Image (cartoon, grey):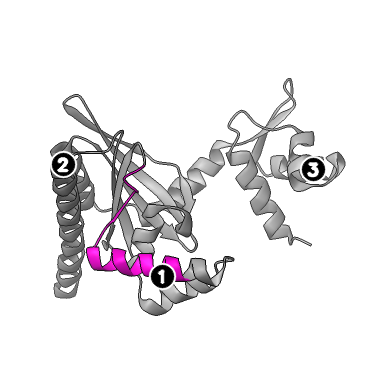
Amino acid sequence: MASAADRLTSVIDYLSQFPEGVTTSELATHLRTTNQAARRILESMAATSMVGRDAQARRYYLTLSFYHWGFSAAKRYSPPPLVQQEMAALAAKIRQSVYLLLRDRNWIVGMERVAWEGNDCFTAPFLRRYHWSESIIGLAVVAALPTQERDELLANETVSKEAIDELRAELDVIAQRGFAERNEKSSSYLAAAPVFYDEQGPAAIVLTAPSQPSADDRAFWTSSLVDCTARCSTTRRVANVLDLLD
């Protein structure tokens, strides 16, 4: 049986997927419980301002309190200005979108997107989450982890030994190259490289394009990406030295 904390986490995660809100019966179906039990959970959350209630539509939705809590908690993960500048410079250089994603245990969580449109760059939140083993981005991040930590993640995968061996071999290749790329057979392009800009372990800077590039563009983009992450990681080391001098 799920604990109260697990049940609450499941409710919050479900509500976050539906900005327009959910009905009691929809939540009950998701939780595999009764409408009465689902209503009790939602009403208790409403009493603490965690959720709002649309009486006319009979829907419950997460309140702005969650935005405030999430934004406040995410501040510790926000990239420093120099990393943001490097991302903007990379987007301008390759004329494509650039993203920053962080690792949260078994998940890779989106933080920021720098898009290039026309002659302008703009930054916006990037609200996506992937399991590390199911995305090129996750593989790029995990490939940069210490061997012991990488092995622990592999040990928790519920797949066959052959699949684990394939994952380990792919991680080794990515670690040697310094970046990961989406399969050339895909219609769109994606490359990801790990970056170390704080003490929380590797993140990933990612570039994407709506179609596969030429061989020359591919080489230019990946070298530009690796150079960008190297400068971001250097920024971290310089910042650490300056902290020691203070």
222 to 141, vertically: above or below: above
Residue at figure coordinates x 50%, y 66% from the top left: 163
Query: What amino acid is labelled 1 in the image?
Result: Arg
Q: Secondary structure at mark 3?
A: helix
Do labels 2 and 1 touch, CB within 8 Å?
Answer: no
The magenta-colored residue range is 165-185
210 sits left or right of 226 in the view: right
The residue under label 1 is 168
Which is nearer the N-term, disc 3 or disc 1? 3
Gap between marks 2 and 1 measured at Cα? 29 Å
Write down the residue under mark 2.
Answer: 217
**Residue on which the image places disc 3:** 38
Q: Residue at x 44, y 51 (%)?
A: 109
Is the magenta region chiefly helix, strand or loop?
helix
Percent x, y of residue 33? 82, 47
Disc 2 is placed on an element classified as helix
